[in-house]
Image (cartoon, helix red, strand yellow):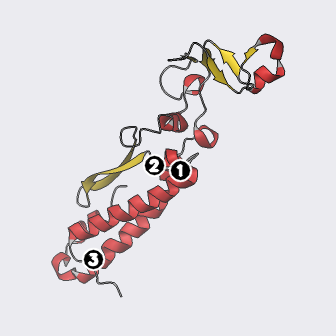
Amino acid sequence: MARPLTDRKQVEQQIKQKIKEQMKEAVQKYAPSSRVAKSVAIFFRGNLDRGLQVSFRITRGEYSDTPDALAHEFGSGEHAQTGLQQRYVIKPRIARLLAFHWEVANKNPEKFKFAKDGRVLLPMVRHPGIKAANSEKGFVRPAFAEERENFQPYITNLIRGMLIISNEKYQGRSDIIQHILDVNI
């Protein structure tokens, strides 16, 4: 049987760890790929006394191979949910032409030039962007919404256990007990 927690810092750390674990699992479930899911960092502000706030950041620093992670959360180009909604120009950086496989070009071959390997050759494209994942709901926001419902009972039970163990410390202080149980997540 696990030893009961009596230290508030210990309880707070356990709560944060549990939330992080649950969030990582939920983000993986909604993310379009595991590479994109790894771009999410989870942060905490506050504490059990003042309220614990959970937030997230989609990073590009530590995981530099996910420049599209924000686009999967908020859309990009014409599908952007914030900022300008317009196509964006993509030009080659080193070569003179872009080369890629494109079904539209294959259906209208008379309108395009092709490389020997079948890729269409273009001097630039006006990309429409991508829609956010999960029917334009993103992947982090649905994960937070789903898991938020699980946080409160877990935290409440953990804190109740702590209060039962250290009852004499809080005896007669129902205002403190209620405040602790109303953790703001």
Image position of 34 (left or right of 48): right
Point 17% across, 82% down: residue:
168
Q: Is residue 182 left or right of residue 49?
A: right
Determine the residue positioned at 51% across, 44% down: 36
SS of the residue under disc 2: loop
> Residue at the spot x=60%, y=37% of the render?
136
Above or below, 133 relative to 76? below
Residue type at mark 1? Ser
Instruction: Where is residue 77? Give x, y as percent.
Output: 56, 23
Residue 99: percent from left, percent from top: 65, 22
Tell whether label 3 touches label 1 (CB within 8 Å): no
- Tell me how far mark 2 sits from mark 3, CA to CA: 33 Å
Disc 2 and disc 1 in contact, CB within 8 angstroms: yes
Single out the mark in the foreground, 2 or 3.
2
Residue nearer the viewer, 130 or 119: 119
Q: Which is more foreground, mark 1 or mark 3?
A: 1
State the mark number for residue 34.
1
Asked if 61 appears above or below 101 in the picture, the reply is below
Mark seen at residue 162: 3
Residue that badge 2 annotates: 38
> Helix or strand or loop: what does disc 1 sit on?
helix
